[in-house]
Image (cartoon, rainbow, N blue to C red):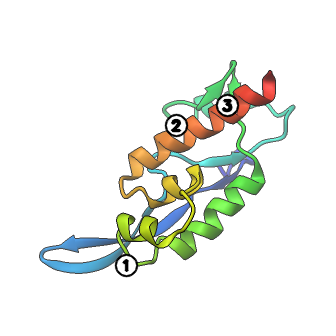
Amino acid sequence: MIRQGYKCSRLICLREKNVKGQVQWLTESLFPGYLFINLQDDANWVPLRSTRGVSRVVGFGGRPLPVSESLVVELQDRSEKTLKSTLDVNDKLMAKRSPPSELDTILMTKDGDLRALLLVELVTRQQSYASH
C-alpha cells in the first residue's frame, strides 16, 4: 500500500500472555486484520480493494468508513500507555470511579477481534449521528 502512495497505520499493543507456563509480553495488533489508511475526501480509494492482502474496505454508505485522525492518535497514545498494565480488566474497572467510556472498554478488551468489532461499531454509530 505504501508503494501506491497510501499512508497507513497499524496500531500495536503489548499484551500479557501465558506462553508455555510463563508470563510474557507480546506485541500484537490492536485491531487484528485492520489498517488505518489516511485518504483525502476526494481520493480514489477503489485501488485499495484490489491491493494484495486487502480482503475488503470497511465502508459506510458506499464509501470507506472514515475514522478521525484524532481518534487514531488517541487510540495509539492510550494503547501504548494502558495496555502495558498488568492489571486485569476487572481491576481496571474497579479502580475507576466513573463508568468506563466506550473507548476505555475497547482498549481493555483482551480479544483483538472483539476490539476491532467494537471500534467499527463505535465509528459507524458516530457516522450515523453525523449524517442525521
Instruction: Name the residue carrying label 2.
Output: 54
Given this view, does label 1 or label 3 mark the residue nearer the observer? 1
Q: Position of residue 57 (x, y in %)?
A: 59, 32
Given this view, does label 1 or label 2 mark the residue nearer the observer? 1
Tell which residue pokes out farthest to the left in this image.
Answer: 21
- Disc 3 secondary structure class: helix
Sequence-first disc among 1 and 2: 2
Which amino acid type is shown beneath numbered disc 2? Val
State whether residue 17 is above or below residue 116. Answer: below
Q: Position of residue 13 (x, y in %)?
A: 48, 67
Instruction: Name the residue carrying label 1.
Output: 86
- Residue shown at the point (21%, 72%) measured from the top left: 18
Instruction: Name the residue carrying label 3.
Output: 47
Sequence-first disc among 2 and 3: 3
Residues at marks 1 and 2 touching, judged by CB atoms closer than 8 Å: no
When asked about the image quadrant of residue 101, the answer is bottom right
Which amino acid type is shown beneath numbered disc 1? Thr
Sequence-first disc among 1 and 3: 3
